[in-house]
Image: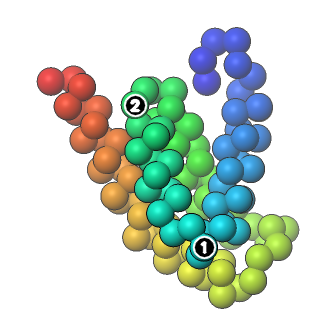
Amino acid sequence: ASEGQPRHLLNSLCTALAILIIHINENWTNFVEHLSQELSDSVDHATCLLLILKYMASDCDNDSIVVEDSIRNNFFQFIDSIAPKVFDQIFNQWAMKLL
C-alpha cells in the first residue's frame, strides 16, 4: 500500500472484492478480466490485483463463506484458467514499461 494508507484497510477491501467476485462470477464472467485491465497500470494497482487474486483463491476454500458447492467448484476451475492469463498480462505490461 502507498504511504499513509493502512494496510489492513487495503486487505479488507481486497478480501471483500474477492468474496464478491466468488458470488457474481457466474453472472459476470469477464469481471476479473476487466478488473485486471483496470488494475495493471501502476505498481499499487497491480499489487491490489494480486491481493484480490490471492484472496479469491484462499477465500474460495473458506467454508465460512456461504456459497453453493457447485459455484465453489466452478470458481476453482475459473481461477485455474484465469490466473496464468492475468499474471501474463501484468508481467507483459510491466515488461513493456521497462523497455
Q: Residue at x 34, y 58 (%)?
A: 85
Q: Position of residue 37 (x, y in %)?
A: 41, 45
Q: Residue at x 66, y 55 (%)?
A: 18
Give, as a three-letter code, the residue at label 2: Asp
In the depicted structure, whether residue 82 falls above or below residue 92: below
Q: Position of residue 97 (x, y in %)?
A: 24, 25
Q: Residue at x 74, y 50 (%)?
A: 16
96 and 62: which is toward the camera:
96
User: Mark 2 vs mark 1: which is more N-terminal?
Assistant: 1
User: Is residue 89 visible in the rendered structure shown here?
Assistant: yes
Q: Is residue 41 left or right of residue 71?
A: left
Cα distance between the residues tagged 2 and 1 = 26 Å
Q: Is residue 97 left or right of residue 83?
A: left
Q: Position of residue 42 (x, y in %)?
A: 43, 26
Q: Position of residue 49 (x, y in %)?
A: 52, 43
User: Quadrant of the image for the N terminus?
Assistant: top right
Residue annotated with mark 1: 27
In the depicted structure, whether residue 70 falls above or below residue 37: below
**Number of the label disc, if any, that sits on residue 86:** none
Residue annotated with mark 2: 41
